[in-house]
């Protein structure tokens, strides 16, 4: 597929206006910052365009012990305190380098409210201090911990979904494959614009490389911090679409959890998201794919300015309710 001659024409007026305001603000691009400065800048800007945080009946700070003895922070959001709710285990986006439970709190609260489920958001370890595959292992350890602790937490351990956005979507997709391997049942994998490919060579990577929020320079910056070397790009735990296992084989996707995938039309990651949906379908996995027209990567956290944000939350929540057997 050839590159669009004028990709900015694809943007909604509200999205174009927002990108113009961001450009006029003149903040230094993230890829020019140190990792520590990038983390601070992302934290400071995360809530500016997000919807107000929804009130929850139950909010608890939790600790997840990992295989190497590290204590991960996590936060539980639940819209009801008495019933044993199904649970979405959520991994935030941020290129494996920035982001936190705090940056994605309004999103997680809204999903919990809309889907009438508990959401546990995990502060997995970030690059560059923690390289690949630490985040992958943290995500899996989080799922194992949730299964073990569900009854203690007054949650329904038989109804668990995994989800995430961007890098967190990658972690959720990889965790779903690992769960299939281990015979651990999952109700759903909920993926907002996940990264799935080992190499960023698709048409949408070229078309939306500059000026559409997530830029080519940002992707290279994040992966430069996260990966130990080029060989990691070909590991299925980084690239569930086309990465390989220790035997050199691309992972089959037969029997992984059903998927809800929400993509932004004007996003470098769109082609690989569509390709992953296609691979899942070819493996016989039920897939619900939504592509939100005229918006960019990150839009799910732009609810104050971009109406498609709330639409995507409602669509994802509907998929969760269906997967959990609720109306």
Image (cartoon, helix red, strand yellow):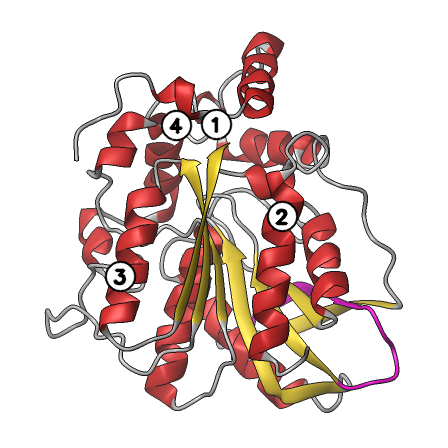
Q: Which mark is residue 259?
A: none
How far apart, in angstroms, are the residues tagged by discs 2 and 1?
20 Å
Q: Mark 3 points at which residue?
A: 278
Instruction: Say if residue 66 shows up in the picture.
Output: no
Spatial CA distance of label 4 from label 3 is 25 Å
N-term mark: 2 or 3: 3
Secondary structure, mark 1, is loop
Looking at marks 4 and 3 on the same chain, the residue that comes earlier in the sequence is marked by 4
Q: How crowded is mark 1: few (under 14 residues within 10 Å), some or many (20 or more)?
A: many
Q: Do the residues labelled 4 and 1 touch (CB within 8 Å)?
A: yes
Front disc: 4 or 3? 3
Q: What separation in Å lies between label 1 and label 3 (alpha carbons)?
A: 26 Å
How busy is the neighbourhood of tag 3: few (under 14 within 10 Å), some, or many (20 plus)? some
Query: Percent from the top left, x then y, of residue 144?
Result: 53, 82
Disc 4 target residue: 215
Tell me, yes or no, whether the two marked residues, 1 and 3, touch with CB atoms within 8 Å. Answer: no
Instruction: Give the CA separation, mark 4 to mark 1.
Output: 6 Å
Among the 4 quarters of the image, the one containing residue 239: bottom left
Q: Specify start and end residues of the magenta stretch as a single range.
A: 69-84
> For this rendering, which residue is in front, 254 or 143?
254
Quarter in which the N terminus is drawn? top left
Check residue 311 in the rendering and tell me which mark sits there, or answer none.
2
User: Where is mark 1, residue-wise?
Assistant: 213
């Amino acid at each position: 597929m050839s590159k669009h001659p004028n990709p900015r024409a694809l943007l909604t007026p509200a999205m174009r206006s927002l990108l113009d305001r961001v450009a006029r603000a003149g903040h230094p691009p993230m890829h020019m910052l140190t990792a520590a400065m990038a983390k601070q800048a992302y934290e400071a800007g995360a809530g500016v365009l997000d919807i107000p945080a929804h009130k929850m009946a139950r909010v608890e700070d939790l600790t997840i012990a990992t295989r190497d003895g590290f204590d991960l922070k996590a936060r539980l959001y639940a819209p009801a305190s008495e019933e044993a709710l199904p649970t979405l285990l959520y991994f935030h986006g941020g290129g494996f380098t920035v982001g936190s439970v705090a940056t994605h709190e309004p999103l997680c609260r809204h999903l919990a409210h809309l889907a009438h489920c508990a959401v546990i958001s995990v502060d997995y370890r970030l690059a560059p201090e923690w390289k690949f595959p630490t985040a992958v292992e943290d995500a899996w350890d989080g799922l194992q911990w949730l299964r073990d602790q569900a009854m203690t937490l007054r949650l329904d351990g038989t109804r668990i979904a995994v989800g995430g956005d961007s890098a967190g979507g990658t972690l959720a997709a990889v965790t779903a494959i690992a769960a299939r391997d281990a015979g651990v049942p999952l109700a759903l994998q909920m993926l907002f614009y996940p990264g799935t490919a080992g190499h960023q060579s698709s048409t949408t990577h070229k078309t939306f490389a500059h000026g559409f929020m997530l830029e080519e320079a940002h992707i290279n910056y994040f992966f430069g911090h996260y990966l130990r070397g080029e060989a990691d790009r070909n590991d299925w735990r980084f690239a569930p679409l086309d990465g390989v296992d220790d035997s050199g084989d691309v992972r089959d996707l037969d029997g992984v959890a059903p998927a809800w995938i929400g993509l932004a039309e004007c996003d470098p990651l769109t082609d690989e998201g569509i390709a992953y949906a296609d691979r899942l379908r070819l493996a016989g996995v039920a897939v619900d794919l939504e592509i939100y027209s005229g918006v960019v990567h990150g839009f799910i956290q732009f609810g104050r300015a971009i109406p498609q944000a709330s639409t995507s939350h409602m669509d994802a929540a509907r998929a969760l309710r269906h997967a959990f057997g609720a109306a």
